[in-house]
Image (cartoon, coloured by chain):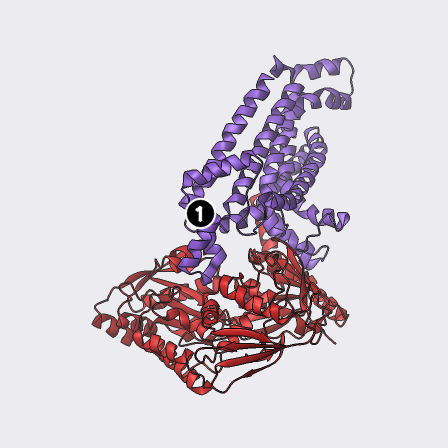
Chain colours: A red, B purple
Amino acid sequence: MKKRIAVLLSLSAALCAPGLVPGTTSVMADETENASSGRTELVVGLSQDLDNSLDPYQITAAGTREVLFNVFEGLVKPDTDGNFVDAVASSHSISEDGLTYTFTLRDGVKFHNGETATCDDVLYSFETCAQTATNTAVVGALSGIQDITASGNDIIITLPEANSSFLSTVSSVSIVPKDYKDQATAPVGTGPFKFDSYSPQDKAVFVRNDDYYGEKAALTKVTCRIYEDANALYTALSAGTLDLAFHLTLDQVNNLSNGYEVIEGEMNLVQALYLNNGKAPFDDERVRQALCYAIDIDGILDLTEDGHGTKLGSSVYPSFTKYFDESLVDAYPYDPQKAMELLEEAGATGLEFTIKVPSNYTPHVDTANVIVEMLSAVGINAHIKKVEWSTWLNDVYQDRDFEATVIGFDAAYLSPDALLQRWVSTDSSNMINYSNKEYDAAIEKAQHTTEDEAQAAAYKEAEKILSDTAANVYIQDLADFVVLNPEFTGYAFYPLYAVDFAKIRPAG
Amino acid sequence: MKLVLKKTASLIITLFIVSLLAFLAFQIIPGDPTTKILGTNASAQKAEALREQLGLNRPVTERYLDWLVSFLQGDFGTSYSYLRPVSSLLADKLPVTALLTLLSFALTALLSIPLGIASGSMRSQAADHLAVITDQIIMAIPPFFFGIISCYVFGVVLKWFLPGNYIPLSENAAGCMGYLLLPALSLALPRIAMTVRMLRGSIRDELTENYVLTAKSRGLSRREILLRHVLRNAMIPVVTFLAVSAAEIMTGTIIIEQVFTIPGIGRLLVSSIGNRDYPVVQAIVVLLAAWIMIVNFLADLVNHWMDPRLRS
């Protein structure tokens, strides 16, 4: 009997390994034959449920933001290159001193509930966003507005001092109909797709906005199916239930054999070994630098992602082309000897600490595992403690009760502030307790510089301080693998979390 | 009547204890709903404001008593992670799980009884051995394992169905039943194997009883003896077992709903624990506990009715 079980097990193991089953190749052939069928309904797999509130000002999860990107728009919105293009506004101008922004409302922009957008709606949106938004950085930027008025079809915003990243704040203020109370459950915006329905843990459905002012979407309906279980999502993808899935791992993509197109981009995350700068032993710069020298970033990329992924060097990822400082990438070349010297100098030989990692994020857990191995080579004894996501948020993020953690931070809006503001010593989300007067000054300076290049230089200066003081061990922007059914084409990466359904169209 | 009263009292006490334990568990594990809702955008003030808004700053006892009083009045509270009344969430999800349970139970009952009778009355030694071995193997297959394998074989390779493409009953009844068939079978298989084995043993025991000899001497055929006399007695333990199965199948859906991505209360329970959404968890836990106890109680009643010896 035991033998039979063994046979059964090995048989099922063989079945589990895609590519070994004779049927798989014929499946692939079927798929390609069906291409160019001109389907206009897309089925998307989401790896997490939507936020509890779909109100654009209440969204916190990146996974919800990237989907509702299709429903909501600001006066301006980001394009794939990170520039701001007119959306609800038909044109905008900035006065020479950088203090006055004039937006002209586009004619005949219709909300999804059929009403026409007016200047009143715009003023209401700015006011509501400033009062209620969960995103503290946006609220902070909006509170700095001196005056906002409507005159005819123009919205005029006056700032007390110039702030050249103000357009990104404007793009974060989704324009919503005045006094519409059901945004949380039935969101209404102006985007190319309308919200149709949402059933928790099951699916969210979006349909094309036929009244869209710009180029109408090619797809008529997008169904987002929710799979909290990574294996369930992967099975559905392999079977062809889904046409599109994003944020997949290299392993998943390598094992996929259904003929889908694999598109590689960047996750737009700053993955790092974040160190609690406020707690011994990481309050000593030399110890933090020793860790930087002891960890071989290329080795991590090779071991966890087969060399994919992009090295960072500081708290900004490369999609922010203007602000990313490439010279910092190799600021700490792999040098275990130097690491040991620094440790000795700091009197921290035989260092021992714990890395808390959220167990649901495999890439972070994998990275942490490699780090532990590398550190043991220089005599550092690091332990991994895997915690559930809620526990991580509570203990590490809110209570700052940790020594080190591996996590990725994304930018909630398209400004380097979204990534750098949090390390200002007084910022409430300064999880690592980073405190550096020069850094605070550099950020302050960047935020109040109007001239583009000078501003970029100021941000880069701040990034360099993070690198010089080894605030964290910066690792990588993870590779983002998107898989698309070849019946469709047009997937585009954005420099922030956004999946643009309007760009996807039937192939051929 | 006395029995019903006694059982009802014990049901209420048990449910009270279960709800208290579930509530206390949330006090022990770290994290609260606000951390999950606010994510990495949280600031201390925001979290505090939200905690105040959700009423999480009140003392534990007050919160529990509040919950209990509302619950007794039929108000299950509001989910933190879906901002909806728990009752409306359950109204969406419970029918899905109920249908899956029903389908799985029907498969178990309809397949295991004929198979059990066949197995119990089998005369060939070799066939019996083979049946026992097959039975043993099926019994050992965990539902999630069969689920994953069948998703792969019938979904990815053979393309008989689309894994992860659950179709609501209201949209397409046949499609819905079709989608639920494999998950129902995954849950049913080990139960079927166990029931068959039990019925087989029970029939074999009964066949050695004296009344069988008597019946034989009166000239009844083997078939008549089996179906009219032996089966009636042999079924008594099996009925209890089947009832317990109904309870276990419902709790088994917690795992199988993840494998097949079925939007039922099992998935809701698992994610609500992760979200620290305790109004939802409380409601489901109490519901599942009540279901298990009621089913067991009904099994007792049926037993009493079937077995005259228990009635006195």
Q: Quadrant of residue B308?
A: top right
Of residue B189 and residue B16, the one placed in the foreground of this image is B16
Q: Residue furthest front?
A: A151
Q: Position of residue A110 (x, y in %)?
A: 69, 69
Residue B266 visible in this rendered orientation of the protein:
yes
Q: Position of residue B255 (x, y in %)?
A: 57, 47
Taking A24 as reference, is A160 left or right?
A: left
| Above or below: residue A346 compared with residue B296 | below
Residue A81 visible in this rendered orientation of the protein:
no
Structural crowding at the residue carrying mark 1, measured as other residues with C-alpha within 10 Å and reported as few (<14), some (14–19) or many (≥20): some
Q: Secondary structure at mark 1?
A: loop
| Above or below: residue A187 compared with residue A159 | above
Residue occupying image coordinates x 40% and y 80%: A446
Q: Quadrant of the C terminus of chain B?
A: top right
Of residue A484 and residue B294, the one placed in the foreground of this image is B294
Residue occupying image coordinates x 23% and y 66%: A349
Residue highlighted by disc 1: B56
Label 1 amino acid? Leu
Q: Quadrant of residue A281?
A: bottom left
Taking B224 as reference, is A47 left or right?
A: left
Of residue A189 and residue A117, the one placed in the foreground of this image is A117
Q: Quadrant of the N terminus of chain B?
A: top right
Q: Position of residue B100 (x, y in %)?
A: 67, 43
Q: How many marks?
A: 1
Residue occupying image coordinates x 75% and y 13%: B217
| Above or below: residue B312 compared with residue A495 | above
Taking A241 as reference, is A403 left or right?
A: left
Q: Position of residue A254 (x, y in %)?
A: 58, 68
Q: Chain of mark 1?
A: B
